[in-house]
Structure formats: C-alpha cells, structure tokens
Image (cartoon, rainbow, N blue to C red):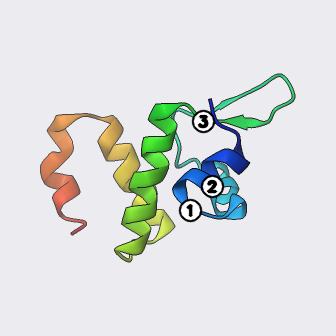
Amino acid sequence: MYTVKEAARILEMSEHTIRYYTDCGLIPSLTRDKNKQRLFNQESMNWLKGIKILKECGMTIKEIKCYVSLSLQGDSTIEERYQYF
C-alpha cells in the first residue's frame, strides 16, 4: 500500500492532484486507513496511471469520470469508450 506522498513520487504527480482525483471519485479502488488517510494498492495505482494518461490526452475530469464508470461496467462498454478518442 502506498500513501499519497509515495504515490505522487512514483507516478510523478503532485500530491494535490492525487487528492483532487480521489475527491472527484475517479479512483474506485481507493482505501483509507484508520486515520482516514488515503492508501493506494496496485489497482488504484493503475487507475491513477490511466487517469494521468487520459488527462494528458486532453480529457476533462467529467469525461474521465464517465470513462471510469464505463470501464467498471466491463467489456460491454468498449465501443462506447472508443467514442472518447
């Protein structure tokens, strides 16, 4: 498990950006410790990597949120996800 600080260092993102993404609900696998600190497992790190790439491609947070939602629905939404590119 990684803290926000560790995730930021590994992914070369700011801590603020990571917190913002989690507050927007973009990381479905986010967990918190007993002190409510965000903790990232490998799955949530992969989500952060993907979101970083989508943002670099010019997607808005709203579009990314829709994309994440579609991704969670499985392969049946692949065609719909292609529309974002």
Q: Is residue 10 left or right of residue 17?
A: left
Tell me the distance, in whole angstroms, between the alpha carbons under discs 1 and 2: 5 Å
Residue 3 in the image: above or below residue 17: above
Residue 39: x, y in percent? 67, 34
Looking at the rendered structure, the secondary structure element under dot 3 is loop
Residue 71 in the image: above or below residue 61: above
Tell me the distance, in whole angstroms, between the alpha carbons under discs 3 and 1: 15 Å
Residue at image point 31% right, 45% down: 70
For disc 2, the neighbor class at 10 Å (few under 14, some 14 to 19, many from 20) is: few
Residue type highlighted by circle 1: Glu
Looking at the rendered structure, the secondary structure element under dot 1 is loop
Tell me the distance, in whole angstroms, between the alpha carbons under discs 2 and 3: 13 Å
Q: Nearer the viewer, residue 64 or 47?
A: 47
Mark seen at residue 78: none
Q: Are marks 1 and 2 in contact (CB under 8 Å)?
A: yes
Looking at the rendered structure, the secondary structure element under dot 2 is helix
For disc 3, the neighbor class at 10 Å (few under 14, some 14 to 19, many from 20) is: many
Residue at image point 52% right, 49% down: 26
Residue at image point 31% right, 42% down: 71
Residue 67: x, y in percent? 35, 54
Q: Quadrant of residue 37?
A: top right
- Residue 6 visible somewhere in the drawing: yes
For disc 1, the neighbor class at 10 Å (few under 14, some 14 to 19, many from 20) is: few
Q: Are marks 2 and 3 in contact (CB under 8 Å)?
A: no
Give the residue number, with chain letter if any, for mark 1: 12
Give the residue number, with chain letter if any, for mark 2: 9
Residue type highlighted by circle 3: Phe
Give the residue number, with chain letter if any, for mark 3: 40
- Residue 24 visible somewhere in the drawing: no
Residue type highlighted by circle 2: Arg
